[in-house]
């Protein structure tokens, strides 16, 4: 195995997290190498999803790997837990369910902080895969939640932006107290 390249995680309050990412023109070798580095970084940080902006690149790229983990047993509709690394380029949500799901989310850019966020229960996403091929995925449960969280990152939306101002300020106060940033 090649030596891992771990990338530094962009953390709050870095304003980059509010920026909109640009579509990838061609999924070439350099993009593939970058996706592998993102993947290694995410696994190293014990994350289940990572957007390129979280390692400082404003590109519409996500990596996801929801490993079959009892941590997500309580999430309704978990039929699509991916057991393989999932590479997603230029994702576009083409369908959203009318039903919603609430889940306590965390984010590598907000270490140690969790909050309930309401998301669509099911979504359908068009994207390009690791080889640049057009694909479509119908996601439910934790995969749907994770995809929506990561696609938000590509649009400069952080999970705290879904919280009430009071909950958001409480979370950020706790994060400051941790002194990690
Ligand atoms: Zn996040």
Image (cartoon, rainbow, N blue to C red):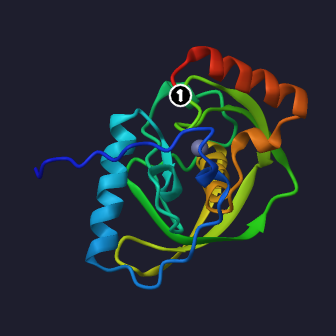
Query: In this image, 158 relative to 28: left or right?
Result: right
Residue at 47% from the left image edge and 42% from the top image edge: 66
Among the 4 quarters of the image, the one containing residue 124: bottom right
The residue lying toward the viewer, choosing from 56 and 37, is 56
Name the element at disc 1.
loop
Other-residue count near label 1 (Cα within 10 Å), few / some / many at <14 / 14–19 / ≥20: few
The residue lying toward the viewer, choosing from 12 and 67, is 12
From the top left corner, tell me how far across and down residue 79 is, in percent.
58, 46
How many marks do you count on the picture?
1
From the top left corner, tell me how far across and down residue 111 is, in percent.
54, 28
From the top left corner, tell me how far across and down residue 154 is, in percent.
62, 61
Among the 4 quarters of the image, the one containing residue 130: bottom left
Residue at 71% from the left image edge and 53% from the top image edge: 157
Instruction: Judge whether 116 appears above or below 80 on screen.
Output: above
Instruction: Judge whether 142 appears above or below 62 on screen.
Output: above
Ligand 1: image quarter: top right
Instruction: Judge whether 50 appears above or below 26 on screen.
Output: above
* Residue pointed to by mark 1: 181
């Amino acid at each position: 195995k090649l030596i891992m390249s771990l990338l530094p995680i962009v953390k709050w309050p870095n304003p980059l997290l509010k920026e909109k990412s640009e579509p990838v023109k061609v999924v070439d070798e350099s993009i593939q190498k970058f996706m592998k580095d993102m993947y290694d970084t995410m696994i190293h940080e014990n994350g289940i999803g990572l957007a390129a902006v979280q390692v400082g690149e404003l590109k519409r790229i996500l990596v996801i790997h929801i490993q079959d983990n009892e941590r997500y047993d309580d999430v309704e509709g978990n039929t699509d837990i991916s057991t393989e690394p999932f590479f997603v380029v230029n994702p576009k949500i083409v369908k959203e369910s009318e039903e919603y799901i609430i889940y306590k989310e965390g984010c590598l850019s907000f270490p140690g902080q969790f909050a309930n966020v309401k998301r669509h229960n099911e979504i359908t996403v068009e994207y390009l895969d690791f080889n640049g091929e057009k694909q479509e995925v119908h996601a439910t449960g934790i995969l749907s939640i994770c995809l929506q969280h990561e696609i938000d990152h590509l649009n400069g939306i952080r999970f705290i932006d879904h919280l009430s101002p009071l909950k958001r300020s409480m979370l950020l106060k706790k994060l400051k107290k941790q002194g990690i940033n």
